[in-house]
Image (spheres, rainbow, N blue to C red):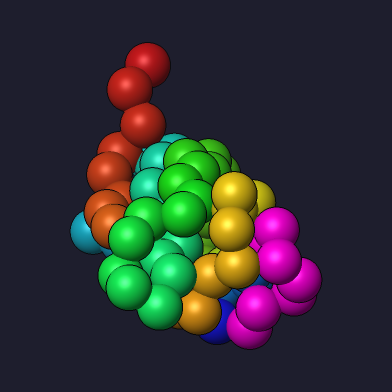
Amino acid sequence: FTPIDDRSIEITFDLDRRDSGLAHTCTLIARDYEKNVVGEIDIPIAPSATNPIKITAKIPTRLAAVNAGVLECRPSKG
């Protein structure tokens, strides 16, 4: 992860899916120094023939974040 400014942080992660032909949704979170969640976003991941895939996303925050992580990734419904 890389803090961008006081209102956003960028995270890069690898997603290894059981079925890369299915769309997924990943929930990303950002935390401050006291481990409070200051940002959370769901991002859609399109089906892909590549597995694992590298994903970079920007998480908007309400305060400055010092770290970011992937809370969960799950197959998208519908």
Q: Is residue 8 above or below residue 12?
A: above
Visible residue check, residue 15: no
Return the x and y of residue 46 as percentages of the image width and height.
Answer: 55, 44
- Magenta span of residues: 2-8
Left or right of 37 on screen, residue 13? right
Return the x and y of residue 35 as percentages of the image width and height.
Answer: 30, 70
Q: Is residue 69 above or below residue 21?
A: below
Residue at image point 30% right, 39% down = 75
In magenta segment, residue 5: yes
Foreground pick, 32 / 4: 32
Q: Residue furthest right?
A: 5
Left or right of 37 on screen, residue 3? right
Return the x and y of residue 48 as percentages of the image width and height.
Answer: 53, 55
Residue at image point 70% right, 58% down = 7
Foreground pick, 39 / 22: 39
Residue at image point 60% right, 67% down = 64
Q: Residue furthest top?
A: 78
Left or right of 60 on screen, residue 5? right
Q: Residue furthest front?
A: 34
Return the x and y of residue 65 as percentages of the image width and height.
Answer: 54, 70
Count of marks overlaid on the render: 0
- Indicate the quadrant where residue 68 lies: bottom left
Foreground pick, 29 / 66: 66
Foreground pick, 29 / 5: 5
